[in-house]
Amino acid sequence: MRSAVLLRSLATIDARADAAKSGRTPVDKEIRVTELSYVDGTIGSYLDRLASAEPEPGGGSVAALVGALGAALVTMVTDLTLGKEKYADVQEAVAAIKTESEKVRRELEELVTLDAKAYRAVATAMRLPKETDPEKTERDRALQAALVGAAEVPLRVAEAATEVARLSLSAAEKGNVNAVSDAGVAVLLAEAAAQSAALNVKINLAWITDEDFKRDTWAKVETVLAQTARLRDVVLPMTYSKI
């Protein structure tokens, strides 16, 4: 989700209105991504939309994508290990790593798009009428609910990224030594995903009024960041020692 989410949404609404009045083509005509999934499009179309003035995708979606790339690298290491006689004694363990890495990759791929959908819920709540007191009350309720959802998505990304980091360690320990550098890259991507997701959690928490939710959610984020940092500190030296 974009960091300046509320201001960005209003700016986008105004820009689209101006484009419609002037007859200009909206920015996303050629780079529209389907509702199905961002990952079903091309890398180029995703990057073009990311670089545009559109409010989504943003940093939360990118965090999920970075985590998915890390998970894919873990899977690659396992594929380069499975079936190799040199690694006969770890075949069962490596197959299990692959199953887990593919599961978390699919989750993160889904979160690439879910983050954008969470933003849209916030934008929809922002557009609710607020002329009367009952309207203001309903708008505030809807906006708070949407913001909670928008914070929960990057939290899921951060937690999944921790799993990618854990699997990176297993891949570095048991995987084909010729691909150990990819396990090292995977743990770096996992930490980057966790840190990026944490920023997106934090920006949403700033707008939320439920203090208990804010405290509990940020505590979970801090745990995730500590775990990924510890795993990075183990995997990177191991990776360099094997190259």
Image: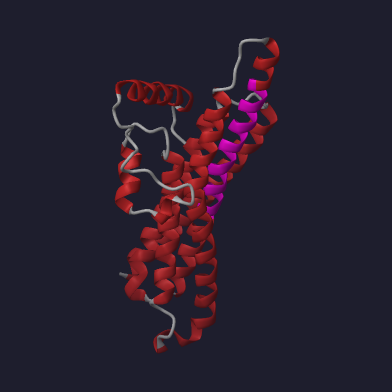
- Left or right of 133? Residue 66 is left
Residue 187 place in picture, x, y as percent: 42, 57
Does 77 sit above or below residue 125? below
Question: Along the horizontal axis of the image, is 132 left or right of 30?
Answer: right
Return the residue nearer the eye: 241 or 104: 104
Residue 156 magenta: yes
Front residue of this view, candidates 41 and 239: 41
Q: Nearer the viewer, residue 219 or 193?
A: 193
The residue lying at 37 percent from left, 61 percent from top is: 184
- The residue located at (41%, 89%) in the rendering is 85
- Give yes or no for residue 195 being in the magenta stretch: no
User: Most prominent secondary structure in the magenta stretch?
Assistant: helix
Q: Which residues are magenta?
A: 139-162
Residue 93 percent coordinates (x, y): 54, 77
Instruction: State the image coordinates of residue 181 (x, y, percent, origin top left).
Output: 33, 65
Residue 45: x and y, percent?
32, 48
In the picture, measured across the screen, residue 114 lies left or right of residue 216, that is left
> What is the tally of numbered marks visible in this picture?
0
What quarter of the picture does the C terminus occupy?
bottom left
In the image, is residue 232 above or below residue 171? Answer: above
Residue 30 located left or right of residue 40: left
The one of 43 and 220 positioned closer to us in this rendering: 43
The residue lying furthest to the bottom in this view is: 85
Question: Which residue is rendered at x = 41% and y = 79% of the image?
Answer: 81
Looking at this rendering, what residue extends furthest in the top direction? 132
